[in-house]
Amino acid sequence: MKLKHIVTTGLSAAVVLTSLYAAQVAAQDEQFFPLLVYRTGPYAPNGIPAANGAVDYFKLINERDGGINGVKITWEECEFQYNTKQGVECYERLKNKGPTGATIVFPWSTGVTYQLIPKAAVDEIPLHSMGYGQTAAADGRVFKWAFNFPTTYWSQASALIRYVGAQEEGMENLAGKKIALVHHNSAYGKEPIPTLQVLSEKFGYDLTILAVDHPGQEQKATWLQIRRLKPDWIFMWGWGVMNQVAVKEAAAINFPMDHFIGVWWSGSEADVIPAGDAAIGYKAANFHGVGAGFAVHDDIVEHVYGGDAEAARANNLGEVLYNRGMTGSMFAVEAVRTAQAKYGNKSLTGAEARWGMENLDLTEERLAEIGLEGFTRPLKVSCEDHETMGPVFIQQWDGAKWNQVSEWIEPMRDVVRPMIEEAAAAFAAENNVTPRDCSMEG
């Protein structure tokens, strides 16, 4: 009896140990992403579709592909209500989760990005502030752990000026034109100002800068100024309810909507639908496809929603900010896939994922393979260039949907890149950062 008991106990222990080992191995084959989200608070109408798009793409990769080369994606949402302090707290709470810690962090806020840049360098976790954040981070020699591809606010501002010049039938015709910038009174809203000022000196247009305080529901004084100023063009760097109010106020003073252009955070369905027909003609910049007419959307309906297209649409499928969240997750997945080619098909550390981001070469062929043909432009990241200075296009609201109404517009690299390098050098000097020698990077 004693022998039987010993054997049985030994077998039970072996089963437990085997189970624990299997669980440990399974955990090692997971790639963890912290998701900072704001599904509540004043910016929830914008935060919800972006978060839904980000999550649905991760679900698609798990369900359709079995993960990234067999490594399942895991994630955890942390609600921060677009509050910088809460965003930093979310980062601290989630940075060490998963078998190898956080893979890539998406701050989804310029204010949070500024706070996390020094932390990420210490923690060796890459940040991806996709088209937002600190523009100087485009210089990877100084900002090793921060990325802002495919383009930045400074590049976008220069592309907007190039677009306006084309509408005025020549850049030389910008001289004497009046351009007003209506911006969210925050680090985010102030980002394009240096570029617009430099280009004002270069092309001779008159620039008026008008700040709108958070959350942006009260703008009467701003639009009274605009009515007196009578600008030829208005740019808006807004977010959340500020955008809805601004579109309504512009309509109230009969400003021509086709001369009112928003940043890519001021060009979602939530920004125009509340204004009804008054929003028809309003424009905004973008760097990825609009609508749900791409193969990847069909795959999401099939694999994530079990073929229920109505449920997918209810979860914002194809909306501008859904597509943006989806785009961010796609970049992350492809960066991890790139890194796996060097480090193996396993759960990667943040440092290994950072290498994948810095060596990401997303070709037209690869975009087509993953269902995103024509959705966004190819890009190639490098040690020197964490932005890639990708082109943007202009979309316009027709009362029911957004339509692309311009070709892809290249930023003014000759103006913007020197500004980026100067700002990065100043950051390096102030923070005792020694710029990397990219020729030494492997």
Image (spheres, helix red, strand yellow):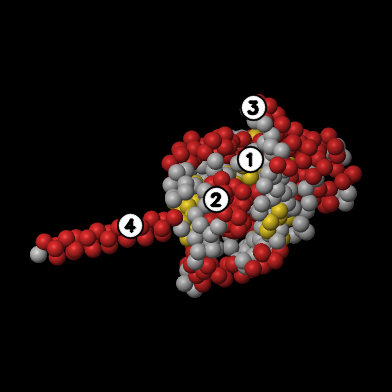
In primary-sequence order, the first of circles 1 and 2 is 2
Which label lies toward us, 2 or 4? Answer: 4
Give the foreground label among 1 and 4.
Answer: 4
**Which is more toward the observer, 194 or 103?**
103
Disc marking residue 20: 4
Residue visible at 84% across and 51% down?
Answer: 166
In the rendered structure, which amino acid carries the disc numbered 1? Answer: Lys
| Marks 2 & 4, CB-CB < 8 Å contact | no
- Measured in 3D between alpha carbons, the distance from the residue under mark 1 to the one under mark 4, in whole angstroms, is 37 Å
**Residue type pointed to by label 4:** Leu
On screen, residue 421 above or below 50: above
- Give the distance between the C-alpha atoms of the residues marked 3 and 2, in whole angstroms: 37 Å
Please tell me whether mark 3 sits on a helix, a strand or a loop: loop
Q: Where residue 257 appears, x then y in whole percent?
A: 71, 51
Residue assigned mark 3: 432
Q: What element carries label 2?
A: helix
Dot 4 crowding, Cα within 10 Å, few <14, some 14–19, many 20+: few
Give how far across and how far down residue 300 sits, in percent: 53, 67
Q: Position of residue 281 (x, y in %)?
A: 70, 56
Q: Distance between the residues labelled 3 and 1?
A: 14 Å
In space, the residues marked 1 and 2 are separated at their CA atoms by 29 Å
Residue mark closest to the camera, 3 vs 2: 3
Horizontal side of residue 306 vs 231, given as left or right: left
Viewer-closest of 423 and 269: 423
Single out the mark in the foreground, 3 or 4: 4
Circle 1 sits in a helix, a strand or a loop, which is it? loop
The spot of residue 88 in percent (x, y) is 49, 38
Mark 4 and mark 1 in contact (Cβ < 8 Å)? no
| Circle 1 residue | 144
Residue kind at label 2, given as amino acid type: Asn
Please tell me which residue is depicted at 57% across the width and 57% down the height of the picture: 340
Front one among 231 and 314: 314
